[in-house]
Image (tube, rainbow, N blue to C red):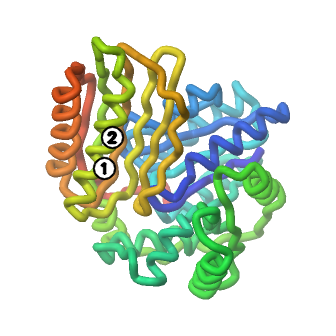
């Protein structure tokens, strides 16, 4: 059984690639499953994969390394109940040191599980780093980004469809020079052919030994702590049947308000679910988002989940999101019914196990 441990920075397209891979495998009658992971307890990704009929377990309230026992419990549960050929485990977008804290402990405890580490990177973001149009505002965050790529078995340069052939050539050359000896692949999460290539790479990959990262946990901890996490679940009610349009307008306003503050958006994820209709909308540092399915149906009410990861304070992020939601529902004569919410900065990473 393959455990496709999938990491990479926020907004790199990991979830889209995983869901498309699962759909492809299930269409061929191949059993698969997903383990989602987040510092918070309300996960858009879990809601999405569950809505698609993909067997899903989740590790909440901390990254895989700090919640290793929960990861192992979910892994064993899925193997026992689903009997999948491949399980995709998506780590938190700021998590690194996966080889020492996840791969090697699994190899010792469950040697029949073959772990492959795929690290995704947004090719358009890498291009921005090369030409100077984008940058990390905090060097500690840059450190996390670099360490993630350093321990990859497979580096997946995603969203290649957003760049020209020449631009991709520059990006691939840059990554190969920075991480010599790594298997570098270009991919679009929305391309069935590219997803098939990734699945083949996972099946064929083998490695005798992996070095653990030489990593400074003080820098790691600071890099995670400069990012704010905001999670919210709510209901929107519209007497005119415009609940979905209200949600879309609120999403647009949240995005615009954050851009106006010139803060780094790690990712904004929204899951909207109305009777007979659901949609995930994802906004990344490069501004890319999934196309909304048209036409948008009428709905008197909907459930909405928000996961926002932004380089600012939790208080500021909470204020921006809450203010945009309230302004939108008031202006469009709708009603907002809050369920749960949380705003916080991740705590210091303390792995359950670390094999150096």
The residue sitting at 40% across, 61% down in the picture is 285
- Residue 342 screen position, x and y as percent: 25, 37
The residue sitting at 27% across, 52% down in the picture is 256
Q: Is residue 252 left or right of residue 81?
A: left
Tell me: residue 16, above or below residue 93: above
Tell me: residue 281, above or below residue 57: below
Q: Is residue 160 left or right of residue 84?
A: left
Residue 334 appears in which quarter of the rendering? top left
Label annotation for residue 251: 2
Tell me: residue 236, above or below residue 30: above
- Residue 81 screen position, x and y as percent: 70, 25
Q: Residues within 10 Å of mark 2 (few under 14, many from 20)?
A: many
Residue wearing tag 1: 255
- Residue 295 screen position, x and y as percent: 52, 28
Label 1, label 2: how far apart the Cα atoms are: 6 Å
- Residue 119 in view: no
**Mark 1 touching mark 2, by CB under 8 A?**
yes
Find numbered disc 2 in the image and state the secondary structure of the residue it sits on: helix
């Amino acid at each position: 059984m393959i455990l496709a441990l999938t990491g990479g920075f926020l907004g790199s397209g990991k979830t889209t690639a995983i869901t498309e891979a699962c759909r492809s495998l299930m269409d061929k009658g191949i059993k698969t499953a997903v383990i989602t992971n987040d510092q918070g307890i309300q996960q858009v990704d879990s809601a999405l994969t569950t809505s698609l009929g993909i067997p899903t377990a989740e590790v909440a309230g901390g990254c895989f390394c700090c919640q290793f026992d929960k990861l192992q419990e979910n892994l064993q549960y899925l193997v026992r109940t689903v009997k999948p050929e491949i399980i995709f485990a998506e780590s938190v977008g700021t998590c690194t040191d996966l080889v020492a804290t996840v791969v090697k402990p699994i190899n010792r405890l469950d040697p029949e599980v073959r772990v492959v580490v795929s690290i995704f990177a947004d090719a358009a973001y890498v291009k921005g780093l090369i030409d100077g149009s984008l940058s990390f505002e905090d060097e500690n965050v840059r450190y996390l980004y670099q360490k993630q790529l350093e321990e990859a078995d497979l580096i997946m340069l995603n969203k290649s469809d957003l760049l020209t052939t020449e631009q991709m050539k520059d990006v691939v050359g840059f990554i190969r020079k920075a991480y010599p000896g790594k298997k570098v692949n270009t991919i679009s999460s929305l391309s069935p052919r590219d997803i098939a290539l990734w699945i083949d790479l996972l099946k064929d990959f083998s490695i005798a030994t992996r070095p653990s990262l030489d990593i400074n946990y003080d820098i790691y901890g600071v890099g995670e702590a400069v990012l704010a996490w905001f999670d919210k679940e709510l209901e929107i009610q519209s007497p005119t049947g415009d609940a979905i349009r209200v949600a879309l307008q609120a999403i647009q306003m949240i995005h615009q308000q954050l851009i106006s503050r010139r803060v780094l958006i790690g990712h904004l994820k929204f899951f909207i679910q109305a009777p007979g209709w659901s949609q995930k909308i994802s906004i990344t540092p490069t501004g890319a988002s999934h196309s909304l399915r048209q036409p948008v149906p009428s709905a008197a009410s909907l459930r909405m989940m928000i996961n926002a990861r932004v380089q600012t304070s939790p208080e500021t992020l909470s204020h921006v999101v809450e203010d945009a939601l309230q302004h939108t529902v008031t202006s469009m004569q709708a009603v907002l019914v809050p369920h749960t919410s949380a705003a916080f900065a991740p705590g210091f990473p303390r792995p359950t196990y670390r094999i150096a």
